[in-house]
C-alpha cells in the first residue's frame, strides 16, 4: 500500500476529529491556563482553518471531507450543528461558507522587519468547547467506524481517511481498543485508515511527538492511546518529521498527522485581516 494519492476534487481525503468532551476536559492546562476543552477547540478550529485556506488558493478546490464526533454527556454524536447537522462528514466547501461565527482574537505576528507585535485578527469558529459527563470512548469509535466505512467504499481512489482522536485518555463505558483496531483495517486502494491519538494532559511534562515506544509516556491512559494508534507509514515519515521539526504545540502535531500524504500546509498565524467574508478568497484574507 502506497499512501501516495494526493487529494483532489474527485478524490478528497476524509479528516475525522473524534473529541473527548467529558467532565475531565474542564481541567486546566498547566502552560496555557486554558481548560483542556478550550485548548482542543482552538486546535480543531485552527486546523480546519488551515484546510479551508489550503483549498481556497486560486480557485476553490474541495480536497477534504471534514467531520467532528464529540463524546461525553449523552454518548457519542455529531459535534457540529446548523449546516453540518445532516451528516458527520461534510465537504470543506461547507466549512468555507458556514463558520459558526468569526471572533476577534489577539495574537502575536512577526513583521517584515522581524519585530514581534500583538494585533487583533479574525478567527473563524466552527466548533465550541464542551466538558460534561462521562467518557464513552468506545461509543465514539463505534460511531467513527460507522462514518468511515461507507466513506471508504464510496472513495476507493482516495488517500485513506485520517482520524484524529483527542482525549485525556480516561475512558469509561467499555474498552475502545478493539474497535480502534478494527477501524485500522478499513482501507481505500491507497492504504489503511490512519488513527492518530493526541493525549491532552495537565501534567507539566515536555510534549512527546510520535514516539516509537510507550516507555516515556506519562501514564497508563497515554500508553493505551499509543497502542490504539496507527504506525506511521514509511511513505509519510519524512514529511511528519519535517512538519514537527522544532515544534511542540498540539496544533503542530495535528498538522503533522496530516502532513505526509495529505499535504496540508502549516499556517502559523490566524487571519491577519480586519474583516472576514466567506465570499472572499480566504487565501487572500490570510495574507493581508
Image: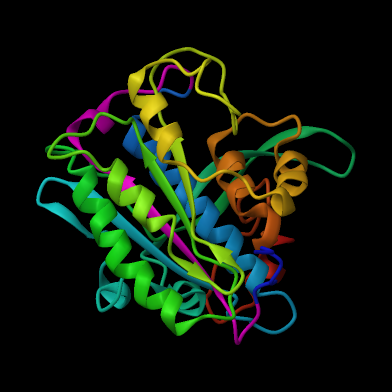
When asked about the image quadrant of residue 125, the answer is: bottom left
Q: Is residue 56 visible?
A: yes
Quadrant that contains the C terminus: bottom right
Please state the horizontal and vertical placement of residue 237, each as a whole percent of the image: 72, 45
When asked about the image quadrant of residue 225, the answer is: top left
Please state the horizontal and vertical placement of residue 121, each as a whole percent of the image: 58, 51
Location of residue 206 with respect to 176 vertically, above or below: above
Classify residue 102 as left or right of residue 206. Answer: left
Q: How is the image coloured?
A: rainbow
Please state the horizontal and vertical placement of residue 46, each as a whole percent of the image: 53, 51
Please state the horizontal and vertical placement of residue 224, each as a whole percent of the image: 36, 30
Quadrant that contains the N terminus: bottom right
Residue at the (20%, 38%) spot, across then down: 22
Magenta-colored span: 8-31
Taking the magenta stretch, the answer to whether it contains residue 62 is no
Location of residue 206 with respect to 150 vertically, above or below: above
Classify residue 267 as left or right of residue 14. Answer: right
Amino acid at each position: 500500500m502506497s499512501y501516495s494519492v494526493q487529494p483532489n476534487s474527485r478524490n478528497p481525503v476524509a479528516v475525522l476529529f473524534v473529541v473527548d468532551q467529558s467532565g475531565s476536559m474542564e481541567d486546566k492546562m498547566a502552560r496555557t491556563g486554558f481548560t483542556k476543552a478550550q485548548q482542543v477547540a482552538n486546535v480543531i478550529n485552527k486546523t480546519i482553518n488551515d484546510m479551508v485556506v489550503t483549498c481556497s488558493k486560486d480557485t476553490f478546490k474541495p480536497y477534504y471531507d471534514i467531520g467532528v464526533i464529540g463524546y461525553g454527556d449523552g454518548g457519542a454524536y455529531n459535534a457540529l450543528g446548523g449546516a453540518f447537522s445532516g451528516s458527520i462528514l461534510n465537504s470543506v466547501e461547507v466549512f468555507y461558507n458556514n463558520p459558526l461565527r468569526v471572533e476577534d482574537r489577539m495574537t502575536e505576528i512577526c513583521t517584515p522587519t522581524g519585530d514581534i507585535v500583538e494585533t487583533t485578527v479574525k478567527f473563524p469558529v466552527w466548533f465550541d468547547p464542551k466538558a460534561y459527563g462521562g467518557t464513552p470512548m468506545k461509543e465514539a469509535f463505534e460511531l467513527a467506524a460507522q462514518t468511515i466505512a461507507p466513506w471508504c467504499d464510496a472513495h476507493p481512489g482516495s488517500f485513506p481517511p485520517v482520524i484524529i482522536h483527542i482525549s485525556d485518555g480516561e475512558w469509561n463505558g467499555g474498552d475502545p481498543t478493539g474497535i480502534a483496531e478494527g477501524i485500522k483495517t478499513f482501507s481505500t486502494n491507497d492504504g489503511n485508515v490512519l488513527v492518530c491519538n493526541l493525549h491532552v494532559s495537565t501534567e507539566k511534562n515536555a510534549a512527546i511527538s510520535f514516539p516509537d515506544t510507550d516507555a516515556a509516556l506519562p501514564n497508563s491512559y497515554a500508553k493505551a492511546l499509543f497502542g490504539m494508534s496507527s504506525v506511521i507509514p514509511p511513505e509519510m515519515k519524512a514529511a511528519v518529521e519535517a512538519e514537527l521539526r522544532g515544534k511542540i504545540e498540539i496544533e503542530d502535531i495535528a498538522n503533522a498527522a496530516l502532513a505526509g500524504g495529505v499535504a496540508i500546509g502549516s499556517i502559523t498565524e490566524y487571519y491577519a485581516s480586519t474583516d472576514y467574508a466567506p465570499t472572499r478568497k480566504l487565501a487572500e484574507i490570510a495574507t493581508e
